[in-house]
Amino acid sequence: MLEGRVAIVTGGTRGIGLAISRTLAAHGSNLIIGGHSDEARAKQVASELADEFGVAVLTAIGDVGDPAVANFAAKVAFDEFRQLDIVVNNAGVLEDALIGMISNESVEKVLSTNVKSVINFTQSCARLLARGGGGSIINVSSIIGRVGNSGQLVYGASKAAVIGATLSAAKELAEKNVRVNTIAPGYIDTDMIAGIDAETDQARRDSIAMKRVGTPEDVANVALFLSSDLSSYVTGQVIGVDGGMLI
């Protein structure tokens, strides 16, 4: 389905990002996977994916809030493959705090990782995507960015911003055949929810109409659809992957 294509996946070594990396590789895409600082982990994942699926997997390590990291990832794609077809802006952080107790440091960290990264990679990669005749940018938002949640003022704001960035970029890049869409996951079984207390965890589970927690693979399958020609006429959309969750 994706044979010969090239994808950048930020935050591609763990959780949802790793599931997306695996799914794209399994369908033939070469990869450039990003991680914040654990270069050894990124290289290990790259080696494992390359061996398992027979595709080329490279790494681009650094803080995605830094435009230089996005520029470097785009340069790797051009230098090594002379093309770029898919960009998955998945890297993100979650820091909960009640209003009045939110630190400036937390605001800066969350907005930089969750929002600036999307802007950085969109700017750095759009021209290369268009150069090859078009491609797909997939931004990972959250159900919280759509409906909000107590204790998540900053996180909700950041994920709502991802949706706004998606809608604007989709309109601007459509004429270049670059599609831009957002996936908005609900309660997904990753490290991000591992520290949630038992009472809150049960409340979240009870709010899901399908009565199960989502898996990273549930999100990855939608990313595969948006990466492929099956979605060639889909842009500017926000696709919930939440099992009918209500918050």
Image (spheres, rainbow, N blue to C red):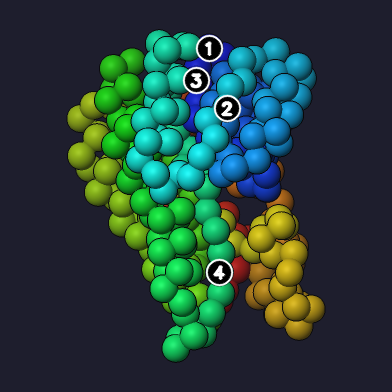
Q: Does residue 136 appear in this view? A: no
The residue that appears at 70% across and 33% down in the rendered structure is: 40
Q: Which of marks 3 and 4 is nearer the N terminus?
A: 3
Asked if disc 2 and disc 3 are in contact, CB closer than 8 Å, the reply is no
- In terms of secondary structure, where does tag 2 sit? strand
Q: Where is residue 76 in the image (x, y as percent from the top left)?
A: 45, 20
Please tell me whether mark 3 or mark 4 is closer to you in this view: 4
Closer to viewer: mark 2 or mark 3? 2
Identified by mark 3, the residue type is: Val
> The N terminus lies in which quarter of the figure?
top right
The label nearer to you, 4 versus 1, is 4
Tell me the SS state at disc 1: loop
Residue 163: x and y in percent read: 37, 56
Q: Is residue 232 left or right of residue 26?
A: left
Mark 3 vs mark 1, CA separation in Å: 7 Å
Circle 1 sits on which residue? 4
Mark 2 → mark 3, Cα distance in angstroms: 13 Å
The mark nearer the N terminus, 1 or 2, is 1
Q: Can residue 16 be seen in this view?
A: yes
Residue holding disc 4: 95
Give the Cα distance between marks 3 and 4. Answer: 32 Å
Q: Residue tagged by mark 2?
A: 59
Any mark on residue 6, and which? Answer: 3
Please name the amino acid that badge 2 sits on.
Answer: Thr
Q: Residue 34 carries which label?
A: none
